[in-house]
Image (cartoon, rainbow, N blue to C red):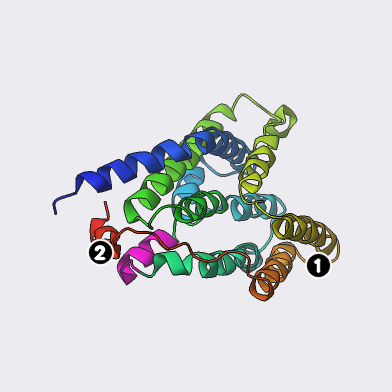
Amino acid sequence: MKVSQHSVQSLKQGVWDALPLMASYILSGVIFGMMALAAGLTTWDSVAMSFFVYTGAAQYSAIAMITENTGMWAIIITTCLLNTRHFLMALSVSPYYQRFSSGQINALAFYMTDEQYALTLNRFRHQPPDVSYIVGVSLALHFCWVMGTWLGAVAGQWIPDPEALGLGFSYIAMFIALSYFQLTSLSRILTFVLCGGLAVGVAMILPNGVHLLVAGLVAFAIGYALPSDQVEETNVDPKSTQGAESA
């Protein structure tokens, strides 16, 4: 299949836009790789988990539960709870994905992370939806996560206490930066503060993962009741960016 010049440029732009996040992904992957090694996983077990599972929060939780000899079903349920937020994220980007084919949507769904979601959503508020751009962002971040995991698993043999390095703050700094670009109105700022505080409070009384779902549902309800942003129309012909231009 012939790939258009526009698709190549969009792919490169996606990788370029993901560049500020790639360092944080590598650092987070390094921490996970170290923790996985300390929990008894082999280097290739850790890499395979990052390649096929690819969900940072759930992987961190799974490693902690493996260390405590938690049963398989408890780990699976926790993973599902932690990732329920993806349902709400998918709803918010669905208007931008309508021009893509079902096959493309299903493939891209695997790569939806918090960072990929924020980056692509911000892009499509100003530019026409583009599969190639999403692929560029997604593959760049996925590669860095897997590479970081491998580096961490290898380096973990010489670092007995990876958490003492304080690298975990890179994850927090990354989310703060991503949130900044979404806080474009007073209603968004208030929603951000309200739901953030709600998530912290709920986390103290309900099982792991539920606090994200509760805060997400509240944010979704606020957005539905007080819609301040509409899907931006562009002057670009939809056919020019239709699913056929995937990479």
Amino acid bearing label 1: Leu
The quarter holding residue 163 reads top right
Q: Position of residue 195 (x, y in %)?
A: 76, 61
Q: Quadrant of the N terminus?
A: bottom left
17 in relation to 68, above or below: above
Instruction: Identify which residue is drawn at 30% across, 69% down.
Output: 101
Quick check: 118 left or right of 10?
Answer: right
Left or right: 22 with respect to 243? right
Residue beneath the point at 66% across and 45% down: 180
How many C-alpha atoms fall within 10 Å of the one at disc 1: few (<14), some, or many (≥20)? few
- Residue 111 pos. (x, y %): 45, 55
Q: Main secondary structure of the magenta part?
A: helix
The magenta stretch is 99-109
152 up-or-down from 2: above or below:
above
Q: Whole-Å distance between the Cαs marked 2 and 1?
A: 47 Å
x and y percentages locating residue 201 in the rendered image: 85, 61
What number is the disc on residue 206?
A: 1
Q: Nearer the viewer, mark 2 or mark 1?
A: 2
Label of residue 127 in the image? none
Q: Secondary structure at mark 1?
A: loop
What residue does disc 2 label?
239
Amino acid type of the residue tagged 2 in the rendering: Lys
Task: Tell me where residue 75 appears, x and y as whole percent.
Answer: 63, 62
Q: Element type at marker 2?
A: helix
